[in-house]
Every structure is written in structure tokens, then in C-alpha cells.
Amino acid sequence: MTDGSRKIYITSEAKKLEILASLELSGSVRTLDRLLRTSYADLATSTSEEVRAKYARWLEVAQTGLAIEAEWGEGALLDLNDPIFVDMRARGDMNPVRVRNAEAYAAAHPGRKFSSPSIL
């Protein structure tokens, strides 16, 4: 039974940037998009011009990725070699549809990395 209270986690700007970079590298565009629009939206008004520029770029990356996933299916951009996804697959915790979409996209675009500058 819970008391109805909510836990609030404070994450530093540096940690947020680290997490967003990791999400981009792993091809997790849906999570990237969700965080940018919700709990990490404060990065858009950072005192650092560099942070604001990274935030704006990640917004573009997320929108480009979501457009690709709209065509290829959810999870199409996932890097299945990312250690997190390797572990999830080994435990049977990954949605098989997302795995198939990622495999199909990778087969159709050999050598293309979602996180490369050319994606935009």
C-alpha cells in the first residue's frame, strides 16, 4: 500500500545530456522524444548556448527518427548490438515486433548508423 506520495528525482543537466546522447546512439527515438518534450524540456532554456543547441539538434533527431519509424515500424532504429538491448533480448524482455523492425531496417540500410550526422 502506498501513501500517495510521488518520488521526485533531480537529474543534473550533465546527466541529462549523457542520457540523451545514449538514447540517440542506441536508436531509442521514442524515449528520446518523450524525454525532450517532458522532464528534459528545461534544457531548451539552459543558460548554456551549447546545451540549447544540443537540445535543438536532438529535437530534430527525434522527429527524423519518428518519421523513419512511422514508415518502418516501432523500434526500427534500435541498435540491437547495444548492450542494453543485447541483455533485454537474452532475458526475453524485448518486443519481438520491435526486434523484427530493427532487423529489417538494418538489413535495408547496411552500415547506416542512426546517430551519424548524416541522419539529419
Image: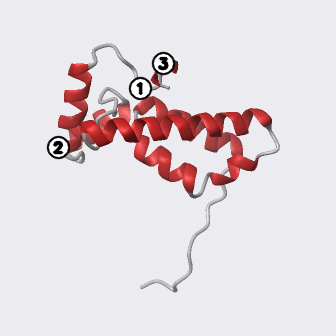
Residue 52 placement, left or right of 41 = right
Q: Secondary structure at mark 3?
A: helix
Q: Residue at x 59, y 57 (%)?
A: 39
Front tag of 3 and 2 = 3
Q: Quadrant of residue 10?
A: bottom right
Residue corresponding to mark 3: 118
Q: CA distance from mark 3 to mark 2?
A: 28 Å
Number of residues whose C-alpha sits closer than 10 Å to that of mark 1, classed few (under 14), some (14–19) or many (20 or more): many
In the figure, 12 relative to 22: above or below? below
Residue corresponding to mark 1: 114
Residue corresponding to mark 2: 96
Q: Position of residue 67 (x, y in %)?
A: 37, 39
Amino acid beneath label 3: Ser
Task: Specify the farthest residue to the right.
Answer: 47
Q: Position of residue 86 (x, y in %)?
A: 29, 33
Q: CA distance from mark 2 to mark 1?
A: 20 Å
Q: Position of residue 59 (x, y in %)?
A: 56, 41
Q: Quadrant of residue 58?
A: top right
In the figure, 64 relative to 45: above or below? above
Sooner in the amino-acid sequence: mark 2 or mark 1? 2
In the figure, 1 relative to 16: above or below? below
Give whichever of 72, 113 is nearer the camera: 72
Q: How many marks?
A: 3
Q: Secondary structure at mark 2?
A: helix
